[in-house]
Amino acid sequence: MTSAAGYVGDELERIFFFFCVCCFVSAFRVLQAETLLLPFIHLKKKLNGPT
């Protein structure tokens, strides 16, 4: 049988870990989205060109 304090500690650790994973994933997605969009942005600038 685990103590209440130990249980709360485990829960906080789990929540903190989940939070870190979420932050990492969202940051990675933002970076990935930017790198995926860069060629399109350059292409759009080329297509618009000097008008």
Image (cartoon, rainbow, N blue to C red):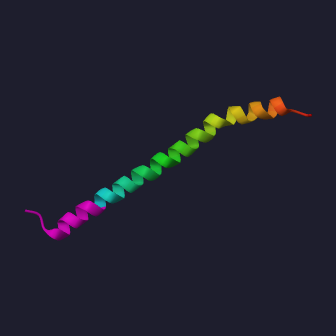
Asked if the stretch drawn in magenta spans residue 6, the answer is yes
Q: Residue furthest right?
A: 51
Horizontal relation, residue 8 to residue 23: left or right: left
Q: Main secondary structure of the magenta part?
A: helix
Residue numbers of the magenta segment: 1-12
Q: Position of residue 17 (x, y in %)?
A: 34, 55
Q: Position of residue 9 (x, y in %)?
A: 24, 65
Horizontal relation, residue 42 to residue 32: left or right: right
Asked if the stretch drawn in magenta spans residue 20, the answer is no
Horizontal relation, residue 23 to residue 34: left or right: left
In the depicted structure, whether residue 40 falls above or below residue 13: above
**In which quadrant is the N terminus drawn?**
bottom left
In the depicted structure, whether residue 15 falls above or below residue 32: below
Which residue is drawn at the image coordinates 70% and 32% (left, top)? 40
In the depicted structure, whether residue 12 falls above or below residue 18: below
**In which quadrant is the C terminus drawn?**
top right
Which residue is drawn at the image coordinates 35% and 59% (left, top)? 16
Q: Position of residue 20 (x, y in %)?
A: 41, 54
